[in-house]
Image (tube, helix red, strand yellow):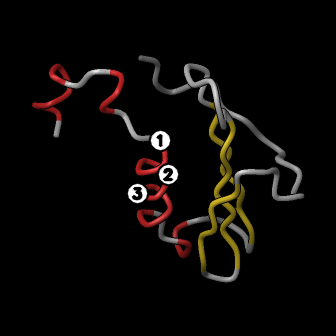
Amino acid sequence: MCWARGALDDEDFNLDLLILYLERSIDPEQLPGVETVIQFKFTDVSKQKDWWLLVRNGSVEVCVVPPGVTCTSSSPPMFER
């Protein structure tokens, strides 16, 4: 929907829906190892800034608290609004 980006206001962004989309979009078979944690840090929201996707045993789980797995690598922010 790149054609709609210019018309979206801040209230149009739904973080819950984004995370749900990401959860459903991940193919566990395409990730290395038996367990992968993907952390998202949203700096422009006031509540629930950190989200995690825990991928293991062929499934993807959304976590709103740290999943108890140590992240061993990180990447700089990819997108900023």
Which residue is at 42% across, 47% downward? 18
The residue under label 1 is: 15
* C-alpha gap between disc 2 and disc 3: 5 Å
Total tally of numbered discs in the picture:
3
For this rendering, which residue is in front, 61 or 38?
61
Where does the N terminus fall, quadrant-wise?
top left
Q: Is residue 14 above or below residue 46?
A: below
For this rendering, which residue is in front, 14 or 19?
14
Per the image, label 2 sits on a secondary structure element best described as helix
For this rendering, which residue is in front, 37 or 49?
49
Q: Is residue 36 above or below residue 4?
A: below
Which residue is farthest left? Answer: 3
The residue under label 3 is: 21
- Image coordinates for residue 21, horizontal then vertical, percent: 40, 57
- Image coordinates for residue 81, horizontal then vertical, percent: 41, 17
CB contact under 8 Å: marks 1 and 2 = yes
Upstream in the sequence, badge 3 or badge 1? 1
What label sits on residue 38 in the rendered view? none
The kind of residue on which mark 2 rests is Ile
The kind of residue on which mark 3 rests is Tyr
CB contact under 8 Å: marks 2 and 3 = yes
Which residue is at 44% across, 67% downward? 24
Q: Quadrant of residue 11?
A: top left
- Image coordinates for residue 45, horizontal then vertical, percent: 57, 25
